[in-house]
Image (spheres, grey):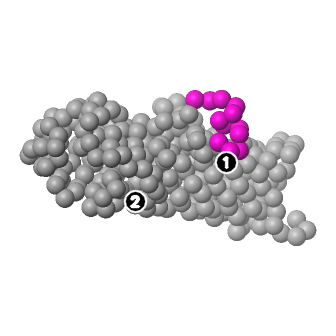
Amino acid sequence: MKSVFAFYFIVFLVGFVDAQNHTSEIGTHRKGEFYFYIGWNRGWFTNSDITFKGDDYNFTIKNVAAKDRQSPFNLDTYLNPTKFTIPQYNFRMGYFFNDHFSISIGTDHMKYVMIQDQTVKISGFISDSDTEYNGVYNDDQIKLKNDFLQFEHTDGLNYINTEVRRFDNLINFRKVNINIVEGAGVGMLFPRTNTTLLDKDRYDQFHVAGYGLSALLGLNVKFLKYFFVQSELKGGYINMPDIRTTKFTSDRASQHFLFLQSNILFGASFSLTKGK
């Protein structure tokens, strides 16, 4: 990860200096262009406290670790149009309202998996659960076994967001343009959370759970006038105060954490302006 950060930091510095001196270079005339892309991501999440509330319980498990779940690569899963939503994917479409800035809307489909069988601290109470976990807790140790809790946003951790992005040209070589991309966005979290809690029935439904803020740095390589490949490092903050956990509407969870994505994307752009 250190090498990835170093690479993007160097790209940012070079691009910033170069952009100040070459803002009128060939390849920067983008006003009126529409673009779209699709690609895939790997994700990382900071540890978080997760609070669960219901009629007979109110407890918080602390410093919970989680990981992503990217699908193993095979051509059928990744390139079959009927299966492209199975892996962790990114989709976006946008419009350049001047030569450097675009506004876009897209989905970052991440997957968040609480690591099973880890030992964490728990505070709060559980009663009338017909399990061995009834009791009052005050920073006690508990192992997150399957019969206590399984907690995943795997269908997935859907960050639907709007972004403003800036594009600056770094290098032009024949029909290839290399550009640096910077951006920031805001959006909502629409996860499909897979939860099994205290032997209650598994729950798995889409629900608007909260909001997110994000920023990104990327490298865009455009070729043959219309097509591009883009790599991105994207990170941000997710706050979900209203996560559904069971079929009972009184059962809810909440958590907030930081995330980081490494994205590889493939797309195309074309002008919507006549005569361009």
The image shows residue 126 at horizontal and vertical percentages of 14, 48
Neighbour tally class for label 2: few under 14, some 14-19, many 20 plus, Cα within 10 Å: many
Q: Residue at x 55, y 50 (%)?
A: 108
Query: Quick one: 75 or 147, which is closer to the camera?
Result: 147
- Disc 1 is placed on an element classified as strand
Query: Quick one: 83 or 67, which is closer to the camera?
Result: 83
The image shows residue 123 at horizontal and vertical percentages of 14, 46
Q: Residue at x 68, y 61 (%)?
A: 94
Q: Which residues are magenta?
A: 72-83
Please state which amino acid type lies under the numbered disc 2.
Answer: Ala
Please state which amino acid type lies under the numbered disc 1.
Answer: Ile
Q: Residue at x 42, y 50 (%)?
A: 204
Q: Is residue 80 magenta?
A: yes
* Residue identified by numbered label 2: 209
Mark number displayed over residue 38:
1
Q: CA distance from mark 2 to mark 1?
A: 24 Å
Query: Is residue 170 something one can see in this rendering?
Result: no
Q: Residue at x 39, y 43 (%)?
A: 152
